[in-house]
Amino acid sequence: MCGIVGYIGNKNCIPILLNGLKRLEYRGYDSAGIAYIANGEAHFVKNKGKVSSLEDKLRNLNIVSNLGIGHTRWATHGVPNEINAHPHFNMAKNLFVIHNGIIENYQTIRTSLINLGYNFITETDSEVIPHLIDRFLNEGHSLCRSVQFALNEVQGTYGIAVIYLNEPDKIIAARKGSPLVVGIGENENFVASDVSAILAYTKQVVYLEDGEMAVVYKDHFTAKTIADVEIEKEVTEITMTLDEIDKGGYAHFMLKEIMEQPDSVQNSMRGRLLFDEGTAKLGGLETVADRLVDSKRIIISACGTSWHSALVGEYMLEQKARVPTEVEYASEFRYRNPIINKDDAIIFISQSGETADTLAALREAKQRGALAIGICNVVGSSIARESMSGIYTHAGPEIGVASTKAFSSQLIVLALITLMIARRKDMSLVDGKNIAVEMEKLPDKIRQILKLNDEIEFIANEFKSSRNFLYLGRGYNFPVALEGALKLKEISYIHAEGYPAAEMKHGPIALIDDNMPVVFIAPKDSTYDKIVSNIEEIRARRGRIIAIASENDDNIDKLVDYSIKIPDTIRMLMPILSVIPLQLLAYHIAVKKGLNVDQPRNLAKSVTVE
Ligand code: AGP
């Protein structure tokens, strides 16, 4: 996600742009920039780092301008640096574009524009937009028509704002898949990713929908479709407070990020599934794909929640790609003088890309000649940069300390890697297509589960005073049991443990009494009957049971105290669905305990120390 803001009116736009970008920094904060028109000239200023460092750069320039756009970046393509920061511009440097989203076909567009003589200076997907618009301007079209023609060439998602020196009376905004609003003022108007950037100046906004654009002047605006059809748009009065808006109207970033998972999971898959070939296209692994496919063993190393996704990845890779796979805590891996062979592939998973133990394990693996691959969420992070190859999860900024959407996006990437390897080995086209089709259904199934939020909140209220919890699962869902337990303990401070369900009889069952809530992950899969036996064992000892079950399971309700029914999918993808109720259960218990959900005690979002 990135933050976009634009201003046209009688005031100086610079302070308005900077204030707006500061309100949008929760959307992305690795680099920032502005473009503006003043005294018949167009200028831009960009900076790596937070908006405050851009502000420092602007402070002594004494710029006065009535038209400008600003952007704070969450890098998806191209490391965070000044060159890759937005705005991007045409070769004449008189047209400036800021973009939020992912251009899936940017490589194709880039190649065709280079063949037409265009020069690219960044590593980003977004830079194709100004050059595309420029191409149509050079054919004599207006800025509005040129933007329309350009966007018709683009596949993927965008929320853009555009300014052009030769038409200095307007900002053009257009939306497909990334939010964009027009703010209506008195002899001034605004464009922004969301209302938090402009609420200090106006409460009158117009929400653009996908496929719509606005031509914004200082005293009015016109709305059109990308196909140049004029449309009427309703002006809405904003009632939310600024603090609520920063969190997208949610009480906490953690809840916002849980609720974002249909979109973040979609973004993790975007442009990476080849349905006809029943496989995955992973640009970041292209240079090492053969070595990865031929590796004799895969080791996955990570910490915390990322270690849990690694455990799911182990099941995926061994069951579907038939590759011997081991999972290692990065903190253990780096110190135990591990046996690493040159035909090993080692995958390092890290949301932040800065976890000290994982980074050190990566360096150790490279030292010993293994293929080192990174799966990170933060573009340009240390682990991403030091990996020999890698894939970004594209989950967007994860602000809440307790990881949620990053986990589901890590599982998506592991499923894509598994699919790619498996289809290069023995997996049939039919099986590959089935996995791809099931992956494409996940966002809607997650939306279905999120509708159970109130029901899960009710259950949370029943257990908010518990002092211990057990989480049990089998197979792919054993790591989900571990993740559910971690979510609960790190934000509610309730002691919780995850176990393979069959392990109960080897000791932990001694803990069971009517004060011990037990969460079972019990979808109707091949281990269901065994899980039901485990549930009976707990019931016999008066344990209180919450089951995450299949929506078509009408047997389990008479066995448990509470059941949360979720849609089914194939086993290897079930963790992406079964974890959602556990995230919400932990969230609501912590909220009901009045705890700081986004910044739990003793924890940090990125553990950059050993
Ligand atoms: C997860 O909710 C925790 N915040 C923590 O375990 C985290 O997963 C761990 O520190 C690893 O972080 P990383 O993915 O950024 O490397």
Image (spheres, rainbow, N blue to C red):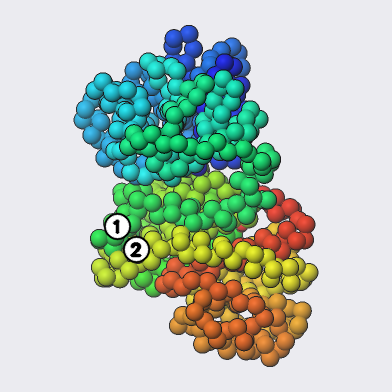
- Label located before the other in sequence (2 or 1): 1
Q: Quadrant of residue 122?
A: top left
- Relative image position of residue 520 (x, y in whole percent): 60, 77
User: Does the beta carbon at disc 2 come under 8 Å from ligand 1?
Assistant: no
Q: Bin the neighbour count of mark 2 within 10 Å (Cα to Cα): few under 14, some 14-19, many 20 and up.
A: many
- Secondary structure of the residue carrying tag 1 is strand
- Relative image position of residue 123 (x, y in whole percent): 38, 35
Q: CA distance from mark 2 to mark 1?
A: 8 Å
User: 4 above or below 332?
Assistant: above
- Residue at x 42% of width, y 43% of height: 210
Task: Pick whichever, 402 or 243, lies toward us.
Answer: 243
- Residue at mark 1: 274
Indicate the amino acid at tag 1. Answer: Leu
Residue furthest toward the left? Answer: 115
- Relative image position of residue 430 (x, y in whole percent): 27, 70
- Secondary structure of the residue carrying tag 2 is helix
User: 443 above or below 482?
Assistant: above
- Residue at mark 2: 436
Q: Quadrant of residue 370?
A: bottom left
Is residue 543 at all visible to an observer of this figure?
yes
- Residue at x 25% of width, y 61% of height: 277
- Residue at x 64% of width, y 42% of height: 245
Q: Bin the neighbour count of mark 1 within 10 Å (Cα to Cα): few under 14, some 14-19, many 20 and up.
A: some
